[in-house]
Image: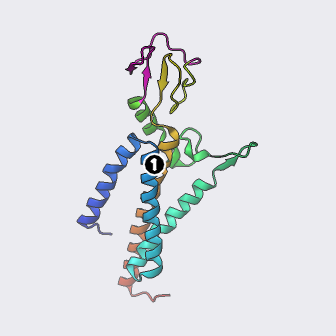
Amino acid sequence: MRFSLREMLLVVTIASLAVPALYFANPWVEALVAGATAVLLAGAAIRSLVCRGIRQAAAVGFVVPALLYGVALATSATHSELGGVSYREMDPYNGRLLTTKSMRYPYEWTTSQRSYYIDSGGKRTKSQPDDYDPYNAGGGGLGFGGIGGGGGPRFVGLPDRDDFMPIAHCLWTLLFGYAGMKYASWVYARREADGSPRE
């Protein structure tokens, strides 16, 4: 299983973009990452149909684990009595997948770095104001990602969990797809070297 210089540079570039994408998670970054993931998945699906040989094997190897991971996320949906749908794996504290649980500490660290308080005078501060009341903070309270209204002290929790976790799962999808691509390429190359008949 070989790695070309171009491939290593691509992996390093994606990894270097993944960290700030999680750190600065917001709806715009989420849309960008989700869009890029969808484009890569669609491109691999097309290549799996039109290409032949090791390129087809690599494309299939990318698509299959990525789709399986997507199915695992989709099956975590729960329906409320009011008709709403929530996904358990979008919560790092309640998810069951190891990938979801592994994002708890990165999420907590990012939140500790980016979250802040706004005091009565409207000034941003990292320390909790003396007159801060978590149960009467203009609607913000202790909820991460919520920005309380009103003129009193409030807590601003960043990043929002609803932005952070979809980005994290897109990155996991790409990682699984890449691992599947490398494995499929290795299996194909080994079969060619052994002279096994094609089926």
Quarter location, residue 181: bottom left
Q: Residue at the spot x=61%, y=55% of the render?
A: 74
Identified at 41% across, 33% down, the residue is 109
Given residues 77 and 82, the one toward you in this image is 82
Colouring chosen for the image of the structure: rainbow
Question: Going 38% across and 30% down the picture, which residue do you hit?
Answer: 113
Left or right of 184 on screen, residue 80? right
- Check if residue 117 falls in the magenta segment: yes
For label 1, the residue is 30
* Residue at 46% over, 51% down: 31
Instruction: Out of 46 and 6, give the one closest to the viewer.
Output: 46
Asked if the stretch drawn in magenta spans residue 103, the answer is no
Q: Percent from the top left, x then y, of residue 19? A: 35, 45
* Any part of residue 171 in sight: no
Query: Magenta segment range?
Result: 115-136
Q: Main secondary structure of the magenta part?
A: loop
Where does the image place residue 123, in percent across and percent down from the top left? 39, 18
Q: Position of residue 16 (x, y in %)?
A: 31, 49
Identify the amino acid type marked 1: Glu
Image coordinates of residue 164 in percent, x first then y, are 47, 43
Viewer-side residue, 170 vs 198: 170
Q: Quadrant location of the N terminus?
A: bottom left
